[in-house]
Image (spheres, helix red, strand yellow):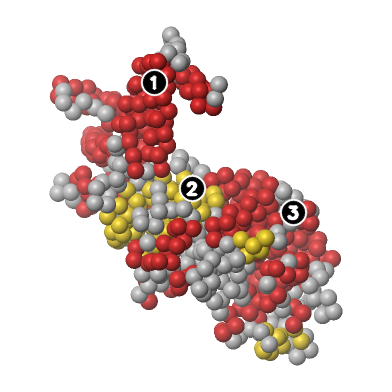
Amino acid sequence: MNYNDRYLRLLSEQFPDIASVTTEIINLEAIMELPKATEHFISDLHGEYDSVSHVIRNGSGNIKEKIREVFQNRLSTSEMNQLATIVYYPEEKLTSILKDIHDEAARNEFYTLTISRMIELAQFVVSKYTRSKVRKAMPSDMSYILDELIFKDSVLTNKGSYYWNIIQNVIELGAANRLISALSELMRELVVDHLHVLGDIYDRGPAPDKIIDLLAKQKSIDIQWGNHDAIWMGAASGSRVLIANVLRICARYDNLEIIEDAYGISLRPLVAFAETTYPDEGIHEFLPKIDETVDHFPEEIKQIAKMQQAITIIQFKLEAQVIQRHPEFQTDNRLFLDKIDFEKGRVLVDGQEYPLKNTVFPTVDPSDPFKLTEDEEYVMAKLQAGFLNAERLQKHIAYLYSKGSLYKIYNDNLLYHGCIPMNDDKTFKQVYIHGRAYSGRALLDQFEKAMRQAYASKGPDESANPDLDYMWYIWQGEGSSLFGKTKMTTFERYYIEDAKTHEEPKNIYYQLRNDKACAESILEEFGVPADKGHIVNGHTPVKERKGEDPIKAEGKLLVIDGGFSKAYQPTTGLAGYTLLYNSFGMLLVSHQPFSSIEDAVENETDIVSTRRIVDKELDRLKVRQTDVGVKLKDQVIQLKKLLQAYRNGTIRPRVV
């Protein structure tokens, strides 16, 4: 018996007779004729939970667009805004509205009207899906009622009182709020069928943990890791140098609560070490970036600055050890502690001497500058144990590994966070990994392999996990697809006044990605049809204020850095871009900054979004033309083979 015969016999267990096979073929063929479902692309979330949650809830404006399509010329702008806010935040908005409605009759009238509008909107939203898919998406506690109301008979008018009575009974039984919430949940889930997250969930913002919890609730999602995700993934794998990087960034952006409160990692050893080792002098360059809305005691700010200074020096020492182990990384230009003239207070950078802004180095031994002191070793051992044993952190990182990758090919689009490292002559840059040279797609495959092996081998003994060093290279190596620059000038920014030393030249990719031929060569390298494929790229904020266009290479490459990070918004001039891809084509959506959930609920404010058509389909795309369609067509082929086997007697139908 060959493989195909064995497969058909297994398939016959699920479809035991001609009738069941025929029914399934008809069902799959019908599904393939439905319009392509909507994909939603977001990137560079950077811990900004409120903004990210709102954009996911409103589908980058998709919910409000559906409301306009259904209720244009029937509802006022104010009424449509209220309905949209109820869909986004049903519990909060209903509480806000109902607190001012004390009359029972008026309250019942509000419920009846709102539920009727929600049902009409839901009917429009679900119209592109099969009943089976819609039913699976329904909250289980309300599925029967939702099924009856959404799929109600529009032909037989004698059931009008039946549907009206269902709504009235729901109201009388005190279940109106739950029904409205269930309708909202259903529409939010179906208005976007699949979510793509192009990296950088972590760093800068205060709540990356809440974002991951939010993403974990999405039923269809993929993640392309960003550089800031990679350092957390490396830290959770036990890399001390990346633990130091994570802590330095958290201290710099005043987000140490993520470490202690969100993930339960004690910072007491670092606090005690910093307080007893570093004086008040020299902390100016390490003062955290403070949110003006958050109150701090002056002593607390000084403490955070000392912690940042202490962990920064530890970082430089640990980085030196990685660099010395790997001459192939070609990162010797990141070694500075051995180039300091401590008596003169000067440092040699690229052959030129510069005065140091800060000459406080209490733990650096000029004769052995890269060696950690006993106290530093103790602090890092405690921190490493904290990261390795942080249950919630490990759960979140495991989720990133399970849903994520360095790149994704989906419906003829190539998705990645950073870049494809290139040379000036438009060839793909070679990088050595474990002694072998890789470039292009093969390079990203090897980077991903190293990242997965590093986490699979996580533990306190770094010498037993050589892939951890590659995690550091992926964070800041010149050939890294996630970094995309020649060097990371962390030392220079802290210690040297001359801004020229702070420059971080980008890989030539960022110039070449404007060229259509280059974008097409990247698509071809990854096996994506260059004639109809696109590259969707995150990582770099689009400086719209300076006239930069997120649509590059004649529409072949789209940059969608979400701009959620408040630190970038003054530079970019907006709160970034997201992307929608539906049966009509691609829409690039630009967003203005989000105020707050409270403001959205009380004042019905929404993120002001502007849509721009990127690629319009001449004929509406169907499921048949998608990756899902390819799988369904293969299923149909196999089912037809089974049908033929039943008819010619090769396989006997079973009586069930």
Report whether 450 appears left or right of 403: right
Q: Quadrant of the N terminus?
A: top right
Work out whether residue 172 or residue 196 is closer to the camera in this orientation and state it.
196
**Residue name at image x 75 percent, y 90 percent:** 344
Residue underneath mark 2: 222
In this image, 305 relative to 157: left or right? right
Using the image, determine if residue 490 lies above or below residue 120. below
Q: Secondary structure under badge 2?
A: strand
Q: Give the CA separation, mark 2 to mark 1.
A: 35 Å
Q: Amino acid at mark 1?
A: Leu
Quadrant for residue 498, please give it.
bottom right
For residue 203, side relative to residue 368 (left or right):
left
- Using a 10 Å C-alpha cutoff, classify the residue at mark 3 as few (fewer than 14 neighbours), some (14 to 19) or many (20 or more): some
Q: Position of residue 211 (x, y in %)?
A: 51, 51
Marks 3 and 2, how far apart in space?
27 Å
In x, y percent, where is residue 590?
35, 62
Dot 2 crowding, Cα within 10 Å, few <14, some 14–19, many 20+: many
Nearer to us in this view, 372 or 419: 419
Image coordinates for residue 616, horizontal then vertical, percent: 27, 55
- How far apart in space, not on screen, are marks 1 and 3 (Cα)? 52 Å
What's the amino acid at mark 3? Asn
Which numbered marker is on residue 465?
3
For the C terminus, which image quadrant? Answer: top left
Q: Earlier in the sequence, mark 1 or mark 3?
A: 3
Q: Quadrant of residue 246?
A: bottom right
The amino acid at mark 2 is Asp
Please tell me which residue is depicted at 46% across the width and 50% down the height of the picture.
409
- In the depicted structure, whether residue 506 falls above or below residue 391: below
Mark carried by residue 643: 1
Q: Are marks 3 and 2 in contact (CB under 8 Å)?
A: no
Q: Is residue 360 left or right of residue 46?
A: right
